[in-house]
Each structure stands twice: as C-alpha cells, then as structure tokens.
Image (cartoon, rainbow, N blue to C red):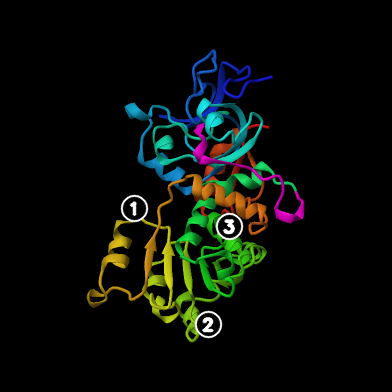
Amino acid sequence: MTSPSSTPELPPRMRAWTLTSAGLTLSPSHPLPLPLPCPPTTIKGTNLLLKITHAALNPVDLHLLRLFPPWLPFRRNPTPGFDFCGRVVAIGPDVTATTNEFTVGDIVCGALGAANVFWGKGSLAEYLVVDSSLVAKMPRTWGPTGQEVKGDAAVGLFGIAGQTAVLMAQTAGVASDADWKGRKCLVNGASGGVGSILTQILSGKGAQVWGTTGSTEGEELVRKCGGTVINYVTQRPVTEYLAQVFGDEKLDFIFDGAGSQEMFAKSPGYLKTKEEGGKFISIVGGASQGVVPYVRNKLRPVWLGGTPREFELLLLIPGRKTVREVGRLIEEGVIQWGVVDGEVWEMEEVVKAYERLGSGRAKGKVVVRLGE
C-alpha cells in the first residue's frame, strides 16, 4: 500500500504539450514535474502529485501563448493550461499533518494560478504538482439527483470559468442563497464558458435570469441553464431592447462576460442605481488588460461623462474559497451539470481544440482528455 507522502511507481517520462519555435508540440518524453526516483520527501509541504485525466481550455491560454515566446529563459518550452481534473498520486507531509483532507486515489479538480502557467508549468501534461489549496474533491453525484459526476463535465466547473462565475455572484454582495430569490439578473454572454455556469448558479439560487446569445445553439443552452433568452442578433440593438423590457422595473445586476462598453454606458435605462443596490459586474478587461475600462467606468465622475451606475471589474485569483464553493454548489444541486462544448478532444488533438476555442463558436467549455 502506498503511504500518503510517497509516490507509486512512475514512468521516467510523461507526455506533455509544449510551446516551441515550431508552435504547440506534443512531447512524448517530457520530464516529470519532480525528480526520479521519488523518495517520500519528493512531494513537499502542502503539495499534491496528480495524474491528470482532463483539462479545460480558456481564452487566457491563447493570450499567454501569443504574448510570451517560448525562448524566454524563464519560460523555455512552456506547457500551457490552467484547468485540471486528476487522481491524487502522492500527498505532501503538511497536508496529512494539518487536515488529512486528501488521500491517494481521490479525484480532485481546480485551476492553477497565473504564476504556474506563466513559468510554463501548465495543466496539459500527464502529471502535475499542485498546492492543495487550489483543489477540491470532485463530488460523486449532481446534488440529490444521484447522477454520477464525471471529470469531463467537472473540469470546467472547478476551473477558471466556474471559479470566475462564483466570484461574479459573490461580488454582487447578496447576503445568502435565499436572498437571491426574485432578483432580476442579466448575463451578457450566457452561452459561453463563464456565462453558462453563472446562469445555472443564479437561477439555481432563485433569481430571475435573462441571458444574451447570438445563435440557435446558444438559445438552447441558455434555456437549459435556466435563463430566458435575449438574442442580440434578432433583438438588436440589444440596449434598446433592454430599455423597453426593463425600463420600468429595472435589473438588479448585469454580469458582463462578453465585454460591452455600450451596455454599461446605456445601463441607466435598465439597471438600478447604486443606492437601489444595482451593480454592473464585468470580467472583460480588453486590450488594456482592464486599465481603460476601470478608469472610464469606475474612476471617471459623472460630471466628466461617467455613467451613474456602480461598476466592478474582476480578476480571478484561483484559490480555496472559490474552488470549494463550486463543490458546495454541485453537492446542493445549484449547479446541475457541466457544459461541455460538443465532444471531448483527445490529447493528440489539442491544437484543434485551441482552434475551436479561438473561433469564438464554442458553447460551454472546450475539454481535452489526457488519461483515465
């Protein structure tokens, strides 16, 4: 039997995707993220060694791949990817000594911090060392339904998209799940990775949710997640439509996952004031990485042309609070399913999977299978 702090027999090498001068390449003999042979002291502190089964892709992956070349000394041949789902292979001594929360064989999910991926230690690899504060155990079932939770559906929920959706809901400042009942919410980009999860969370807590999308596929997804569809193609301009529908009884919250400056600028026509509890919450920073929208929408006073509505721009730092909250929402049946874009891609198909993500046509999360 394997002791909690040691590793079972591991292969000397692993498969991992790396960025080289020739582009993204699948390396069949990439070094493991720890030296071999593996004595019990190899897994240190609060770290876990995981055998990865699934990874989910995020738009930020593409930004990092474009912005930072692979020849940088601190980022030579980096492995991309934030989101992961995998089986615990070994456990650091501080994990067992303090909480005894994880055991070898547990299925866990989470998202890496920006520093890990920036330095090239991403999740698109067969093995991964990660701090235990970044993961949560994957629930066995979807709430009271009794239906089994699987890694391909869970990986995006516990990853960047799911944790961002949780953070957006928390930023609204609603005191408890019960207090969401009857709140009127708009999710802009409701058929995307973040939007589809957020729509489930809000509707699952009892809020009235409207979601924007631009396709028939997207309409079906928004409805399945518990939202009322607003198609910005057929109901355009969407800001005029919002003013017609919510001009008298305004929205409590607008959650912007698509990035619409016009929607915020015209929000006095359909969003409650700050004094009434209204808030516009965005996660899209644009080319300026958030500087321009923050100054324009948060700092600029009304007398200089600012919009008289509360504005928040969020940046997720993955961590214990948000990843464990995802687990709670699944266990309690608030989140009832994971939104996967079409079929799960195999490890050899990562380039095609990134092309799908970059096309802007993905509905839900783009997921890659790395192992069993």
The stretch in magenta equals 129-147
37 lies above or below 275: above
- Residue contact between numbered discs 2 and 3, judged by CB atoms under 8 Å: no
Q: Is residue 314 magenta?
A: no
In this image, 340 relative to 40: left or right? right
Alpha carbon separation for disc pair 2 and 1: 32 Å
In the rendered structure, which disc, 2 or 1, sits on the residue that comes first in sequence?
A: 2
Would you name the residue on which mark 3 appears? 197
In the rendered structure, which disc, 2 or 3, sits on the residue that comes first in sequence?
A: 3
Residue drawn where x is 36% and y is 34% of the image: 69
Q: Amino acid at mark 2?
A: Val
- The image quadrant of residue 298 is bottom left
Q: Nearer the viewer, residue 363 or 48?
A: 48
Asked if residue 55 can be seen in this view, the reply is: no
In this image, 299 relative to 195: left or right? left
Residue drawn where x is 49% and y is 21% of the image: 34
Q: Amino acid at mark 1?
A: Gln
Q: Nearer the viewer, residue 98 or 61?
A: 98
Alpha carbon separation for disc pair 2 and 3: 24 Å
Extreme right residue here? 146
Label 1 secondary element: loop
Would you name the residue on which mark 2 appears? 245
